[in-house]
Image (cartoon, rainbow, N blue to C red):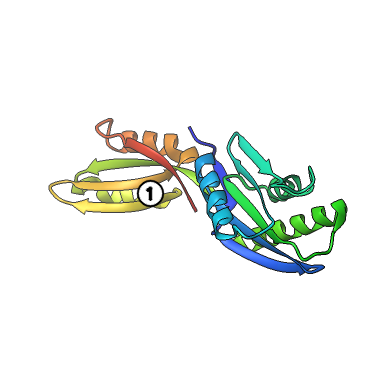
Amino acid sequence: MAEQNLTTLGKEASAEFTEKKSVFIGYAKPIKTAEEAEEFIAQIKKKHADARHNVSAYMAGNAVRYSDDGEPKGTGGVPVLEVLKKSGVDGAVVVVTRYFGGILLGAPGLVRAYSKAAAMAVEEAGIVTYRNYTECTVICDYGLYDKLLYDIGRRTIITDDTDFGGNIKLRLAVLSEEYEAFEKSVYSMTNGKLTPHKTGERYDI
């Protein structure tokens, strides 16, 4: 089963500032896999192929990577990764593009600038926490529908679809930590005739 909660970025976003004539552009994006992160990094590098550096970092489950992209070791990728870690997100990638302005910033200056650009991009993207839901279907007759609706209303359940045919078919997403209790409740109210049919899992608000 997936983790109960996933905290990640709310959307793709960017932010920009200038430090001693060097322009820093931070890009942040929620991702699900390391492959998605690598694709995004490649996309930004292509977009800013004329830039001196495209520093990056991402966290996707157990995959944690960073790159200084030519900056002195530890002055680019590590600060960006630290911003991600401190924000508490997972499934996120940040790329910071630097257009060199001719004035050297020194190692401490680079760390501050890359950290600032990454933090600005993360702030612009926003942070959201998704909860893990178990998707299922329940098929019941019309006589049980009201009872089932009442039970659904007492729990954290999203009704994705209701199909009124010969019987009523509901497609639901039940907060995973409540799924077992819901399953037992359906079984009990139908005297053992019905149980939800689990179809998958997802993260949702």
Which quadrant would residue 49 be assigned to in this image?
bottom right
Residue sitting at the far left: 166
Q: Residue at x 37, y 42 (%)?
A: 135
Q: Residue at x 60, y 33 (%)?
A: 62
Q: Is residue 129 visible?
A: no
Q: Nearer the viewer, residue 24 or 103?
A: 103
Residue 43 location (% of width, % of height): 53, 54
Give left or right: position of 74 versus 136: right
Q: Nearer the viewer, residue 86 or 28?
A: 28
Give left or right: position of 29 versus 145: right
Task: Name the secondary structure under disc 1.
Answer: helix
Q: How many numbered tags mark residues here?
A: 1
Residue 133 location (% of width, % of height): 45, 43
Give left or right: position of 167 versus 148: left
Residue sitting at the far top: 192
Residue 121 location (% of width, % of height): 65, 60
Q: Nearer the viewer, residue 72 or 198?
A: 72
- The kind of residue tagged 1 is Ile
Give left or right: position of 162 versus 10: left
Residue at numbered disc 1: 152
Q: Residue at x 67, y 56 (%)?
A: 96
Q: Residues within 10 Å of mark 1 (few under 14, many from 20)?
A: some
| Figure check: 157 above or below 191 | below
Residue 192 location (% of width, % of height): 28, 30
Q: Residue at x 72, y 47 (%)?
A: 70
Q: Is residue 5 visible?
A: yes
